[in-house]
């Protein structure tokens, strides 16, 4: 815990410990009755067998808080704390003087792998890849900002059986046609045509099978054709990432193909550990606790009966590589809900193999689906899944109708349109599905990117009007009005919020925080005059404005959302 909440927590913990005779959680939280509320006396009274109000009063008397806050007992045994205005003012002045806004770098940085995006080569990116790409990028930015060593891994599907048919189709249509399909972004058309040939033409199917064998045996001519498909797809992914403003580069590519040469070792190691059994000709691991409906153990197929390797084997190789060679101590797999069981079985097998120990954590950062207005999977009118590019282009087109005309209206429309899509996604609780709705996400009021972007731009315009570039430094910020106090408490909660989001990988808690901050700022601005106030109130309030703008900008940046200076 950091900031004012951390200070209060430490002092209260000491008081609770002295009354309880043992470490006791004060159960401290923000409150509507006062600034903070501590409910720990309720549980403690049960342990001690004494009336809660009496315990609360004893803790209040024992608490050394006079230099920080008042403390009163209330209700059945709550402690209400109101922080001293001069304490808030001093902390705000310190925060304003800090480029990091009071967010320290962690003392014990971890190596964190963030596995995200993971589109499939020779296939269009569709709306299903949106959430992984956006959520993963936000988490990587945040962990980076907190001082962790972040390794971005884009586990693209660039290997395996589909490439047999894709290469044969490439040969059938000719390199020029294929290159055109790839660069024009008509990947779906290319894939669909290959699939159709595979499904209808037995000779094509046979050629495709032989091609897979050639690919996996490293035949140079086959590899050359494979590379045509893969580099074409990479060009396409790069263009989507640029449009999205996502920080994935070619250095982060960690495709399935990269693990091919390691799969033999993975099998050997699991086999030596006695973890593999043959089942229907396939080599499988049977991690404990995974059973089918009829109670039989579920297999994780490591080597298929035809000798080939699949998705599961490759993911066993990713986790072994990341824990071993990358020496990561935290692994985040930002992957959709449907792969829950797959990942859980991979993690369990990695634990059985001794790769994943208590020194590290592997977490499935799962997310739900993006739905259309009808509550079903988002589809085009023709029933196809919506491509990501189409979705983003439409958002920017609609944003262009909302932003003022001017020299930079193109960039502005992009910032608002892309920002709106990202924010709508990030602000939805990730475990749940959400409905994709342009009108709602592009609204300038409510919990949206345009609202937050506009709130910040409006603050900058106050400074422009006053002929200032920034707020002058102050020794302390005056916290007297209720709206100033509410805003102060929100501003000071920024560091704790970032740590909470990093620990839980629940990004919507950051959007919720920013929305609350913007609302607290609006209340403040409506009830407290700024430029017309006499000094020193004017200078002090300008610091509150400036801090709000900087906190919004930093928060949006961590979400991967641009904050335009003028709107
Ligand atoms: N390519 C996969 C898919 O489209 C996502 C990869 C996720 N990452 C992983 N290590 N399995 O479903």
Image (tube, helix red, strand yellow):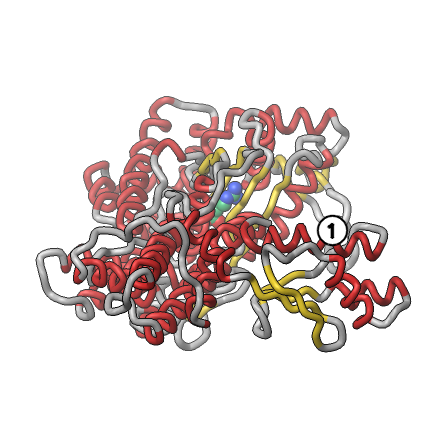
- Residue visible at 23% across and 57% down in the picture: 414
Tally of marks: 1
Q: Quadrant of residue 170?
A: top left
| Foreground pick, 337 / 35 | 35
Q: Quadrant of residue 468?
A: bottom left
Q: Is residue 534 above or below residue 103?
A: below
Q: Label 1's element?
A: helix
- Residue visible at 71% across and 32% down in the picture: 353
Q: Is residue 420 visible?
A: no
Pinpoint residue 189: horizontal percent, then vertical percent: 29, 53
- Residue visible at 83% across and 51% down in the picture: 22
Q: Residues within 10 Å of mark 1 (few under 14, many from 20)?
A: many
Left or right for 405, reference 179: left
Pinpoint residue 247: horizontal percent, then vertical percent: 35, 42
Left or right for 450, reference 402: right
Q: Quadrant of residue 362?
A: top right
Q: Quadrant of the C terminus?
A: bottom left
- Residue visible at 51% across and 63% down in the picture: 429
Determine the residue located farthest toward the right in the rendered image. 49
Left or right for 7, reference 379: right
| Foreground pick, 338 / 526 | 526
Pinpoint residue 371: horizontal percent, then vertical percent: 43, 69
Q: Which residue is mark 1?
A: 14
Left or right for 444, reference 73: left
Q: Is residue 40 above or below residue 9?
A: below
Pinpoint residue 37: horizontal percent, then vertical percent: 64, 66
The answer to whether mark 1 is within 8 Å of ligand 1 is: no
Q: Is residue 499 visible?
A: yes
Determine the residue located farthest toward the front in the rendered image. 535
Determine the residue located farthest toward the left in the rendered image. 407
| Foreground pick, 180 / 509 | 509
């Amino acid at each position: 815990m950091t900031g004012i909440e951390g200070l209060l927590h430490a002092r209260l913990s000491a008081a609770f410990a002295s009354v309880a005779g043992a470490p006791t959680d004060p159960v401290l939280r923000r409150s509507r009755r006062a600034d903070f509320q501590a409910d720990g006396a309720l549980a403690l009274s049960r342990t001690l067998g004494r009336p809660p109000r009496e315990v609360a009063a004893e803790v209040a008397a024992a608490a050394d808080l006079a230099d920080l806050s008042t403390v009163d007992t209330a209700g059945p045994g709550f402690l209400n704390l109101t922080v001293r205005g001069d304490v808030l003012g001093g902390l705000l002045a310190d925060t304003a003087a800090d480029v990091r806004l009071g967010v320290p770098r962690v003392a014990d940085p971890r190596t964190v792998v963030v596995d995200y995006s993971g589109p499939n080569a020779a296939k269009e990116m569709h709306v299903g890849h949106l959430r992984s790409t956006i959520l993963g990028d936000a988490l990587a930015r945040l962990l980076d900002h907190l001082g962790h060593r972040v390794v971005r891994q884009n586990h693209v599907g660039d290997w395996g059986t589909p490439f047999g048919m894709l290469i044969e189709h490439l040969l059938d249509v000719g390199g020029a046609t294929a290159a055109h399909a790839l660069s024009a972004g008509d990947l779906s058309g290319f894939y669909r045509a290959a699939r159709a040939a595979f499904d209808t033409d037995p000779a094509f199917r046979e050629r495709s099978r032989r091609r897979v064998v050639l690919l996996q045996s490293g035949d140079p001519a086959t590899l050359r054709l494979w590379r045509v498909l893969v580099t074409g797809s990479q060009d396409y992914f790069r263009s989507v990432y640029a449009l999205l403003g996502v920080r994935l580069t070619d250095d982060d590519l960690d495709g399935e193909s990269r693990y091919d040469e390691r799969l033999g070792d993975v099998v050997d190691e699991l086999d030596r550990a006695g973890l593999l059994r043959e089942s229907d000709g396939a080599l499988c691991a049977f991690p404990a606790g995974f059973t089918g409906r009829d109670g039989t153990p579920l297999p994780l197929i490591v080597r298929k009966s035809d000798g080939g390797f699949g998705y599961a084997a490759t993911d066993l190789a990713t986790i072994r590589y990341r824990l071993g060679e990358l020496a990561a101590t935290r692994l985040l797999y930002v992957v959709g809900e449907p792969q829950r069981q797959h990942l859980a079985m991979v993690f369990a097998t990695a634990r059985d193999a001794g790769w994943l120990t208590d020194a590290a954590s592997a977490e499935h950062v799962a997310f739900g689906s993006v739905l259309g207005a009808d509550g079903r999977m988002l589809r085009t009118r023709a029933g196809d899944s919506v491509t990501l590019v189409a979705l983003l282009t439409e958002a920017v087109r609609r944003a262009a109708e909302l932003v003022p005309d001017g020299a930079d209206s193109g960039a502005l429309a992009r910032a608002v349109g892309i920002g709106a899509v990202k924010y709508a996604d990030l602000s939805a609780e990730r475990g749940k599905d959400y409905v994709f709705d342009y009108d709602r996400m592009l609204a300038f009021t409510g919990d949206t990117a345009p609202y937050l972007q506009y709130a910040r731009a409006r603050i900058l315009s106050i400074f422009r009007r006053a002929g200032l570039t920034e707020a002058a430094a102050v020794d302390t910020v005056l916290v007297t009005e209720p709206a100033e106090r509410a805003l102060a408490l929100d501003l000071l909660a920024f560091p704790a919020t970032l740590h909470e989001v990093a620990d839980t990988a629940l990004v919507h808690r950051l959007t919720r925080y920013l929305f609350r901050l913007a609302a607290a700022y609006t209340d403040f601005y409506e009830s407290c005059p700024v430029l017309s106030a006499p000094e020193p109130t004017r200078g002090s309030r300008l610091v509150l404005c400036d801090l709000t703008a900087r906190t919004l900008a930093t928060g949006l940046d961590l979400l991967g959302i641009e904050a335009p200076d003028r709107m």
